[in-house]
Amino acid sequence: MHIVWTEFLKLRTTRLWWGLASALLGLSALIAILTLVFAGETPGFALSGETAQRSLFTSAGFNATFALVFGIIGMAGEYKQGTITPTFLAAPQRWRVIVAKALAYAIGGFLLGLSSNLLVAGIAYVGLAIKDIEVVVPTSEIFELLGGTTATAAFFGVLGVAVGAVIPNQIAALIGALVEQLIAEPLLFNFFPEEARFLIGGAGAILSGTPNLGATLSLWAAAGVLAAWCLALLALGSVVTERKDIT
Amino acid sequence: MPESKIVVEGLRKNFGSTLAVDDLNFAVRAGSVTGFLGPNGAGKTTTLRVLLGLVSATAGRATIDGQAYRTLDHPTRKVGAVLEGANFHPGRSARNHLRVVASAGRLDRNRIGEMLDLVGLTAFAGKRVGGYSLGMRQRLGIAAALLGDPEVLILDEPANGLDPEGIRWLRKFLRALAAEGRTVLVSSHVLAEMSQTVDDVIVIGRGRLIAHAPLEELTGSSTGAIRVRTPDADRLEALLRAAGKTPQRIEPQLLLVTDATSPEIGELSARENIVLHELASEALSLEDVFLKMTASAELAPRGSEAS
């Protein structure tokens, strides 16, 4: 579909993508380096242990939040800038625009996840080698962690587009999504530790290898839960968008 | 009946409890420049946005070549639209904006340079739109609308933000587009901009059609006033009143008469040996007609106000 390419062209021609990507990479690197430098000072968190190393390798674990913000701005930002008008003039069947954005921002989220994970992994391997510390986390598990967080970021890019379609007011969408992720879900985790795995954040945590829940899911099942959330919210977003008057 | 390119039938639009467009009907003939006029808040923008599939109608329909905009295959190849407001990402350059428009509508990218030349933006094409003046944005909007080489052009208040030179440019430009056989529908609340540009005029007020006619018909049919300048204004005024007319004294030596013809006044003056310095019939401008019509529409009681 050519409008997927249009979405990539839109991304390439503003600074949003580059700004978000460089902020993410900078922060990820910073966290990885800080972990390398200071991990030994926390009791039970020695760099030679699995816990600290796992934490080191997931230094970019917050990249899904970046992907979410990225997707929201990608969709709701079109309303904010007024570019939604030419967008819908060229593609008046609006659901097509939403599908195109979902695909483009899945790839965008994937790239955000992949680049930050690769950077962190590189820093971790080099840092541990310099400190002459053996990598005790099995390589297969490292792949799983990095692959899982990258996939989560891709899903969250799509979720951001869906949230932006449901709530076209960019600020409201950003605040709503962040409150849901950072406050509402952690509260729900406490009250419903069993069911939390079916929430967006819960399934995301499982998929990215950092679950903190009462019950877990297989990685594939977690991916399935996220995919279901994406489809449901995209469908809702499409209905809202088709009905909206662009004034 | 010439071929109609744009047809609006029984169009009604409510925004909540506000009735923006009320049973509006009109057709725009192919190859003409049609002025879509009305005071601010008359429903012009809403009508145009319904026509472009951006706003859904509460009742009725608006079609281009018999089709609703949303069902057109390659809409931006058929219809070019210049709408009000910020339709550009401030961080994107003009050239990149046109690249996005071309990509989204599958338009010929080779026309980008041509369109930038046409609207005189080539020198600024690499600059971010955020730094553009209102006039430059209007020009960019026109370039984007023309990118698909559309046969129909819809412009909402394109003269806003243009300086006098820009307005003159726009007029010539719209005439040239119509001369190429395109159909142009252009809205405005400033009549002076339009009187030298349009073939037909559609006037709306409070969401309803007030008039739809060729420009000459609209300005010609309304009776104008006769200006009479004479050093003997007192006597002429008295004579006219005696003849049952109602002259108005505008200046010490100037009368305005709406219910007598210039031959009548001329002959009366000759009989009475009154010297005339000026005797001219004052044709009504589009502006006068417009104000007269929209004013009476404001006063007229509303028939079917939706709640």
Image (cartoon, rainbow, N blue to C red):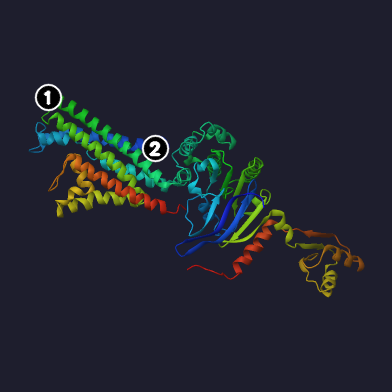
How crowded pointer 2 is (Cα within 10 Å; few <14, some 14-19, many 20+) is rated as many
What kind of residue is marked 2?
A: Val
Query: What chain does mark 1 sit on?
Result: A
Q: Position of residue A156 (x, y in %)?
A: 28, 42
- Which residue corresponds to the image point at 21% horizontal and 49% vertical from the top-left? A199
- The residue furthest left is A44
Q: Is residue A98 left or right of residue B254?
A: left
Q: Do badges 1 and 2 share one subunit? A: yes
- Which residue corresponds to the image point at 68% horizontal and 60% vertical from the top-left? B289
Q: Position of residue A46 (x, y in %)?
A: 9, 34
Task: Look at the numbered disc 2 and give the secondary structure of its residue.
Answer: helix
Residue A169 at least partly seen = no
Q: Is residue B262 above or below residue B190?
A: below
Residue A223 picture quarter: top left
What is the spatial separation of the Cα atoms under label 1 and label 2, in whole angstroms?
A: 46 Å
Closest to the observer: B17 or B181? B181
Query: What chain does mark 2 sit on?
Result: A
Q: Nearer the viewer, mark 1 or mark 2?
A: 2
All told, the count of numbered labels is 2
Q: Is residue B164 left or right of residue B18?
A: right
The numbered mark, 1 or 2, whose residue comes first in the sequence reads: 2
Residue B47 picture quarter: bottom right
Q: Are marks 1 and 2 in contact (CB under 8 Å)?
A: no
Q: Position of residue A90 (x, y in %)?
A: 47, 43
What kind of residue is marked 1?
A: Asp
Task: Look at the numbered disc 1 and give the secondary structure of its residue.
Answer: loop
Q: Is residue A183 left or right of residue A173?
A: left
Residue B98, label in figure: none
Q: Is residue B165 above or below residue B278?
A: above
Residue located beneath label 2 in the image: A4
Residue located beneath label 1 in the image: A132
